[in-house]
Amino acid sequence: MIKKKAATGEISWDIEQAKANPHSRKDEILTIIYSIPLVLAFVPGCEDIVKRGFAVLDECPDWYKLSLGVIISASFGMRGASKFMGRKK
């Protein structure tokens, strides 16, 4: 019973979130931004740029990385972020 209510709540939350932002482009923009390193990794001569960029991001403060995670979670929804991060709900 609890699992059923939890699943229903998660679905309801996703539906409400979708209704609240029917014309929002933030998800598409975030997807494009996150795809840039992926694409550049396959462009000859850009591999070092991608490596250096991730090395710099690795040195960012934890609060900044956490903030990015919150932004992504808010945009794609908690379930979507969990799946993206490799955790299944």
Image: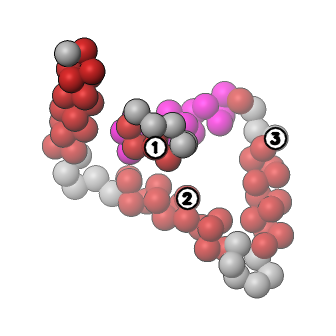
Q: Residue furthest front?
A: 1
Would you call the spot at circle 1 few (<14 residues within 10 Å), some (14-19), or many (20 or more)? few
Name the mark nearer the viewer: 2 or 1: 1
Whether the residues at callouts 3 and 1 have beta carbons within 8 Å, the answer is no
Which one is in front in this view, the residue at disc 3 or the one at disc 1? Answer: 1
The residue at the point 55 percent across, 65 percent down is 35
C-alpha separation, residue under disc 2 versus residue under disc 1 = 15 Å
Q: Is residue 71 visible?
A: no
Count the labels in the image.
Answer: 3
Amino acid type at image mark 1? Lys
Q: Which residues are magenta?
A: 63-78
Q: Residue at x 21, y 23 (%)?
A: 4
Q: Position of residue 46 (x, y in %)?
A: 76, 76
As helix, strand or loop, the secondary structure at mark 3 comes to loop
Query: According to the image, label 3 marks what residue?
Result: 59
State left or right for residue 4 relative to residue 37.
left
Badge 2 amino acid:
Tyr
